[in-house]
Image (cartoon, grey):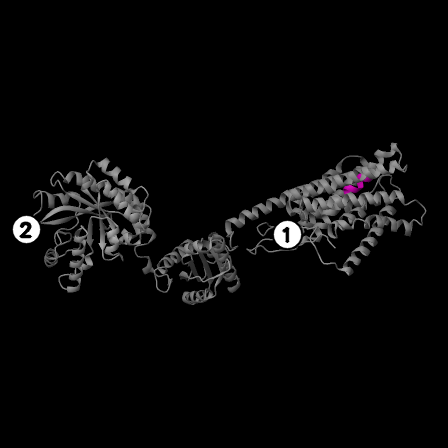
Amino acid sequence: MAGPLLSYVDREPNGLWLKIASVRPFAPRAVNRQKTAVYIVGFLLVWQILTALTEHVFTASGASPLYPALALDVLLLIYVGWRWWPLIPISAVLRWALFERFAHPVWPALIVQIVLGVVFALAVRFVLGRLRVALPLRNLRDVAWFSGILGLAAPFVTALIAVTLLVAIGKVAVDDVPQQLARFVVGDVTAVMAIVPAIITFLGWRQTQSPPEHQDPSRVEVASLVAGTALLVAGGIYLSSTIHEPVLDLSFVVMSWLALRYGIRGAALASATAVVSATVIEIALGLSPAMLVLTQGFLFASSLMVFLLAGLVDERWEMVARLSRRAFVDELTGLPNRERLVEWVDRHADSAIVLVIMDIDDMRLLNQGVGRVAADHVLQQMAIRLRSTFPTSHMIARVSADEFAVAVVDDRSPHAIMTELRAFFDAPFEADGSRVFLSVSMGAVRMIRAGSADEMLRKADIALERAKDSPTHAIVYSPELQVGDSPSLVGELHRAVERRELVPFFQPIFRYDETTRSWRVAGAEALLRWIHPDRGIVAPAHFIELLERLSIGEHVGWNVMEQALLQAGEWRRDIPDFQVWVNLFARQVLQRHCRDRIRDLLERTMVPADALIVEINENVVASDDGDVAALVSSLRDIGVNCAIDDFGTGGSSLGRVRDVPASVLKIDRSFVTKSEVDSKARAVAVTVLRLASELGMTVVAEGVENTMQLEVMLEAGCQYVQGYALGHPLPAELFARTFLTIGRASNL
């Protein structure tokens, strides 16, 4: 038997929201003969009872009363299946055979019931099948389609066809057509609109619950509104029948308020209460046909309006719920997001909380390897595992694309919780038919009184950042981790840029003059210093790494280059071949228009290209796949030479250096400072010098701190040196007075 099915409460992936239940009229089901028999017998029995009661109570009325049997017909077609419409005319025949004793012809009643069954069966099929109206009614669209087709169109078409056929066979006179149409339509539309949606709502009461964010009215308030509706409807009908004033409409105010406060459930209660109250008072007063039409017209109109209003209200509640879910729930995994985590931590601010943030290692490679769809499926599996593994008292959230957080009100050590989480990743995940193993880095923090959620998350993020470089990939926050990375330092750096507190100092670079056998100034390296208003001159070791990670680092880098070029232009008046050496941050090197930016600075400062040497750290050279080589080549094309800085510390090789057409190689100070006492360090320096010279590169020895090191480098063939043995970094004015006023070159 094919029939309607109700899909009852179903939980979405986030476990928080109820789906709107829907009737699916054409879903295949296995035939249950016993249940089918019960449906048939029950329908036939109840139909006979309702019809008998209706005709007995309203025998004297000339207009059709409220017709409950039609509501039963529609419910049969909805819940059992539209194909069962023949039961409707069979019910009429059965009643004629059992109770009429063949006293009257069966044709008129049979024609009416056949037309009614066919029209409403097609209407139900169209509404639930083609239009996919969900029951119970939960939104304005579904209410409008249901009331428009089943509540208005189907009763009108039924009445029109039935009356036409009755006129054709001579059972209804042409003059009686308007009265007969009213007799059919008035009761039918009231039965369908006032009774059917209310019963469907009561049967699916659990599916019509409002979202968790909406506060339902109290039971006392609901009971008061229901009682008020009953009293106003009964009183309105009584007064309208006695004083002939339209006071019945006042009850619509209470019905509307019930729909506004309680949604579809409120509309169902209001409609059902109005029908029962009106029926009781109609029976008690013995209303005239005209008053019956007025009363039933009110029931139809008020039921239609309150259900439309309730559909709009429920739709608004669902929209608010969806917006709330997007605000606090991660759409992919169904887990709470960062905002919900912050709210949770703030709520437990007076408790001891352990917070662990996990970052999936190499998520980018996973996306590339299995595709983003499969990678998203892995994240969903991870969320399911986390929810099924940990109790509901744990807060589990997805805080960013590949970061998850677990927060616990617990006195346990963070290490114990991280060990538990580590075991969680021993089993593989499924990704597009493949088994994928994940590893994570974890940063944890434990606070006796959580206090600010933002502070706790910041500390966990600091621990996570350190964990990525840790062999164990798991770090618990401690104050030592924050050195150089405190939020106050970040803020101070931003203020320092605004106040121009970051300025270049210049350390001289010397070249050995064979003619005079002395070291002479060949240029200077621009080194960044922070002139702090309270702490004085801050060495770069305390802030340069953080500055390079911040977006303002790029701005500072270009500003230093511009100031250095301006100084070079001024100092070349004393030393025509003076060169200024400027370091580039990694983000400057990888900038798309780096060469154009350097060329613009040269043109703006009117300094020749050979006055500038750009230094690129060996770490950048070693980690790059070709962009650095292309940049160095393009700079050489405009006359700017490049130097590889700190050679020997970044994991590069002379083979890699060969691929990057740099002109200068700067040996790291770690080889120079040991050269006077360590023969191996001296041998390495000599080897680098020899191989570099064969590649046509100039070598500069950094970190020369005493005369012995200076002599060792000179003996090894190094013609350029830089270090404290010859000169410290100085502000521009002091540098000029110290190294440039004693002549075109400094003879040391």
Residue at image point 64% right, 44% down: 139
Residue at image point 63% right, 42% down: 312
Which span of residues is magenta-colored?
A: 184-190
Q: Residue lying farthest left?
A: 516
Residue 366: % across, % down: 44, 56
Q: Residue lying farthest front?
A: 694
Taking the image as drawn, is residue 311 in sight?
yes
Mark 1 sits on what residue? 209
Marks 1, 2: nearer the viewer: 2
Which mark sits nearer the N-terminus, 1 or 2? 1
Please tell me whether residue 452 is drawn above or below residue 60 in the rendered image.
below
Magenta stretch encompasses residue 134? no
Residue 192: % across, % down: 76, 44
Magenta stretch encompasses residue 186? yes
| Front residue of 68 and 216 | 68
Q: Which mark is residue 718?
A: none
The quarter holding residue 650 reads bottom left
Residue 488: % across, % down: 32, 51
